[in-house]
């Protein structure tokens, strides 16, 4: 992996969670043991919800930038996303999942999976 | 079963054990599929094969683990999407993919916990995005195309860069890193153009 780094900090630690994520994603595909099915399903569903949340949030930011929303509308949008964010975090903790577990897109390499 | 590695319109045959099967101007590069565990080592081996092919030709990388029955099945799969694949090949011709990720050097407060109002929350998100754009926008100027991906980092993006412009791109990354010492900027590659091989993105 090192030799693919073209430019970066001397310490790659800030980006190291990716490696574990890759191992997780690969092993999860082959270990379908019944005991972890519920957690696996939760992970899959939460991953999709998290992806949708990120996409909708991005759209909301664009609308706010557009300047067509009233103060009240911005406040309401923000509250909605904040609640969704918090609720997702609670669900994640309930199933013992980390933030990284819900990010299965691994950059260029991840598109292989 | 055979495992597919890449689709190209380059007429040169690959080195064994890879073989090519041609269809109407396109060639599918493949090898006999090995029975093996799905591990990160297997993934890297696939990646190395595609990278070696990429060094000498323009290609569309095939997703890791794509198995078909035989060369005939590969030809059929390609001929069904011939026009789309030819367009994609033109799109990535002469270019490689570079990946960039950016993270704040100092951990930032989580907007979901720290914000006291909806407006606060959205402003925190907007600030994050503005920081990401400090790096992303200059890089769009030295790339053919770019693609922002979802991820926990400030920025996770893929750039389609002319082979001859890779060094210039990396220079810009280094300069951005110097200018923005509050950020960690990681650039990896050159990768096969995974993010730009599909029809649209």
Image (cartoon, rainbow, N blue to C red):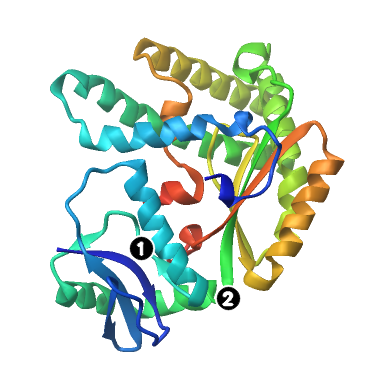
Q: Estimate how packed mark 1 is, as few (under 14), some (14 to 19) or many (20 or more) residues with alpha carbons within 10 Å.
A: many
B85 over A109 or under it: above or below: below
Residue at 34 percent of width and 14 percent of height: A95
B106 over B33 or under it: above or below: above
Residue lying at the far front of the rendered structure: B16
> B128 or B104, which is in the foreground?
B104
Residue lying at the far right of the rendered structure: B179
Q: Are marks 2 and 1 in contact (CB under 8 Å)?
A: no
Q: Mark 1, chain letter? A: B
Task: Say which element carries label 1.
Answer: loop
Q: In the displayed structure, does residue B20 sit left or right of residue B33? A: right
Q: Hey, which quadrant is residue B84 in on the image?
A: bottom left
Is residue B198 something one can see in this rendering?
A: no
Task: Say which element carries label 2.
Answer: loop
Which disc, if any, is residue B62? 1
The count of marks equals 2
A101 over B147 or under it: above or below: above
Residue at 25 percent of width and 76 percent of height: B80
Q: Position of residue B43 (x, y in %)?
A: 36, 49
Q: Hey, which quadrant is residue B34 in on the image?
A: bottom left
Cα distance between the residues tagged 2 and 1:
18 Å
Q: Position of residue A66 (x, y in %)?
A: 72, 44
Q: Position of residue B100 (x, y in %)?
A: 63, 47
* Upstream in sequence: badge 2 or badge 1: 1
Q: Estimate how packed mark 2 is, as few (under 14), some (14 to 19) or many (20 or more) residues with alpha carbons within 10 Å.
A: some
Q: In the displayed structure, does residue B100 sit left or right of residue B133? A: left
Residue at 72 percent of width and 60 percent of height: B169
> A82 or A102, which is in the foreground?
A102
Q: Position of residue B152 (x, y in %)?
A: 56, 31
Q: Which residue was labeled with disc 2?
A: B94
């Amino acid at each position: 992996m090192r030799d693919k780094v073209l430019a970066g900090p001397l310490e790659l630690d800030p980006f190291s969670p990716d490696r574990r994520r890759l191992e997780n994603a690969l092993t999860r595909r082959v270990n379908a043991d019944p005991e972890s099915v519920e957690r696996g399903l939760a992970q899959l569903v939460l991953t999709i919800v998290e992806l949708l949340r990120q996409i909708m949030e991005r759209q909301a930011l664009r609308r706010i930038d557009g300047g067509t929303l009233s103060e009240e509308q911005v406040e309401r949008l923000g509250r909605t996303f904040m609640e969704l964010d918090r609720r997702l975090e609670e669900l994640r903790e309930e199933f013992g999942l980390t933030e990284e577990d819900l990010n299965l897109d691994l950059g260029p390499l991840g598109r292989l999976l | 079963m055979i495992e597919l590695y890449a689709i190209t319109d380059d007429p040169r045959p690959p080195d064994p054990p890879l073989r090519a099967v041609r269809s109407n101007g396109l060639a599918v590069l493949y090898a006999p599929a090995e029975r093996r565990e799905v591990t990160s080592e297997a993934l890297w081996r696939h990646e190395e094969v595609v990278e070696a092919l990429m060094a000498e030709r323009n290609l569309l990388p095939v997703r890791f683990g794509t198995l078909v029955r035989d060369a005939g099945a590969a030809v059929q799969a390609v001929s069904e999407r011939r026009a789309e694949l030819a367009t994609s090949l033109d799109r990535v011709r002469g270019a490689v993919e570079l990946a960039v990720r950016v993270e704040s050097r100092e951990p930032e407060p989580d907007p979901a916990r720290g914000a006291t109002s909806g407006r606060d929350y959205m402003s925190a998100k907007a600030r994050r995005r503005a920081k990401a754009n400090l790096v992303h926008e200059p890089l769009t100027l030295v790339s053919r195309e770019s693609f922002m991906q979802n991820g926990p980092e400030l920025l996770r993006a893929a750039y389609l860069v002319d082979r001859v412009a890779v060094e210039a791109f990396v220079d810009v990354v280094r300069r951005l890193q110097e200018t923005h010492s509050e950020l960690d900027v990681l650039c990896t590659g050159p990768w096969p153009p995974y993010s730009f091989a599909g029809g649209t993105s």
